[in-house]
Image (cartoon, rainbow, N blue to C red):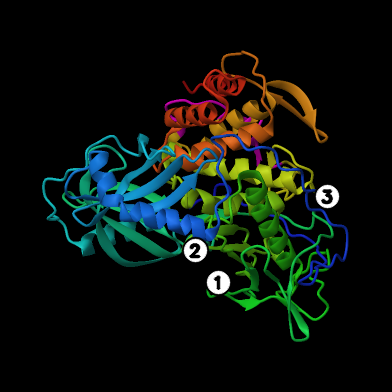
Amino acid sequence: MSPLYARHKRTTLAIATAVAAGALLATGVTTSATAQPAAKPLAAAPTALSAAARTTLIQQAQADAAGTARQIGLGAQEKLVVKDVVKDADGTVHTRYERTYAGLPVLGGDLIVHTAKSGKTQGVTKATKAAIKVASLKPQITAAKAEKQAVSAAKTLGSAKTTADGARKVIWAGSGKPVLAYETVVGGLQDDGTPNQLHVITDAATGKKLYEYQGVETATGKTLYSGTVTLNSVQSGSTYQLTDSARGNHKTYNLARRTSGTGTLVASSTNVFGTGTASSSSSDQTAAADAAYGAAETWDFYKSTFGRNGIKNNGVGAYSRVHYGNAYVNAFWDDSCFCMTYGDGSGNVDPLTSLDVAGHEMSHGVTSNTAGLNYSGESGGLNEATSDIFGTGVEFFANNASDPGDYLIGEKIDINGDGTPLRYMDKPSKDGGSADYWSSSVGSKDVHYSSGVANHFFYLLSEGSGSKTINGVTYNSPTYNGAAVTGIGRAKALQIWYKALTTYMTSTTNYKAARTATLNAASALYGSTSAEYQAVAAAWTAVNVS
């Protein structure tokens, strides 16, 4: 998983909200985006699938998995396990698989099979081109030793408390020749109080650490910028519970300063949640209203824009937890609980529940359930950028007059204390650490800073280079080669990124492969000779990715 930014910076915003009953009774100004007439979908655009239809496609693909493995040339010891399926408007199906070898999970071995409506295989996108073959499945070091080394690595990275629950044997194929390895997940807490899920991959022959990534996605920020909004609640006896039955039964819980458990479902006798002002009380409902609003807008953005039915595309809502810890200046998405968690910030009066942060964090869940971009190196930067891109999409989609859409990340939360945003998509280096352009050293940066290359690409693809003002914010985006870039509009840029993420990117995608993936997406959606395809190529060249 992944944070909104490096651990010394976090983001989010809380919303003062009045809430509606189960019938969506408005108690204030409704700020949701106005529904627009549905346009005719592009042939290669994803089509909305009911939960039953999606389940059927997954079951069919799994039943045919052995035949598919043989057809695409996998070895006798390899098996495919269906992770996800996307169906395009023209009937093309993209099936995402995890792989096993001799019964062991192959990390970095994921692949996507593209199948035409006729049933003919059109191609395969693989996370690794290497054949999965391991000479010996007998480890030379013990699981206990691998676990001990993983705990030591976690402490080196600054984890305050560490626990590990054993090491499992895997095949590691994420960085070249596949090898027998151990995967250890180190729990406990990071140094800022964020839950720890550090995945450490250790070579089972040499004991060398091969890879590591953090499994908890975090963020931080200030609150109270979205005004009075309409929410959904469910009446239970004489109280109203903050449960959104229209969006997969998303629920909002109060942890009341605890750092574990689910918490208590937020409820009100008046069906109004929050006051619109900051409070240090752990029973204050303003943060809960913000969290519920952010979850609702994120759900609606994915549904309206891509036909995606929830984070996992299965119609099931996540849940949110507010008032985590004491003065915890962060927020995070945790795929293991399928939930969002928000701290209350410095002094417990700045809940980390802003709209773009909510969209950012929950988009980590979408990435986890699609491409699964490894949260390290260039793929980690792409993971972070994906959340910035879709978090920005959520903010524009919400069309909230109190928080207009922009290409700034965390602009409402003043995490720097001087009114500046956390990140800038038009010129990422303005934050003092992010990369405007690709270089061979980008992968060694913190993923929140290496994400700048993709954020810059997305801005250029959407709006183009040069000076311009959008929703009152002035931007001036440069290019690596000095060439002018003409944007194609945010709507098309979002479709291209989502298509690339869900049908062409894999766990090991780097910037060069992301260029290929987005060009493939643009070709499928608009044609290989289209202005959109040419704009994708130009925007990548403008950030030095070729």
- Looking at the rendered structure, the secondary structure element under dot 3 is loop
Viewer-nearest residue: 13 or 371: 371
Instruction: Read off the magenta span.
Output: 421-442
Query: Is residue 422 located in the magenta-colored stretch of the structure?
Result: yes
Where residue 321 appears, as percent x and y from the top left, is 62, 68
Q: Which residue is mark 3?
A: 402
Which secondary structure class fits the magenta region best?
loop
Q: Which residue is mark 1?
A: 259
Which amino acid type is shown beneath numbered disc 3? Ser
Q: Is residue 212 left or right of residue 314?
A: left
Which amino acid type is shown beneath numbered disc 2? Pro
Label 2, label 1: how far apart the Cα atoms are: 8 Å
Relative height, residue 30 to residue 86 (above, below) = below
Point out which mark residue 195 bears. 2
Q: Quadrant of residue 62?
A: bottom left
Which amino acid type is shown beneath numbered disc 1? Thr
* Sequence-first tag of 2 and 3: 2
Where residue 116 appears, as percent x and y from the top left, is 42, 37
Relative height, residue 203 to residue 287 (above, below) = above
* Sequence-first tag of 2 and 1: 2
Density class for disc 3 (Cα within 10 Å; few <14, some 14-19, many ≥20) is few
Where residue 247 appears, as percent x and y from the top left, is 65, 62
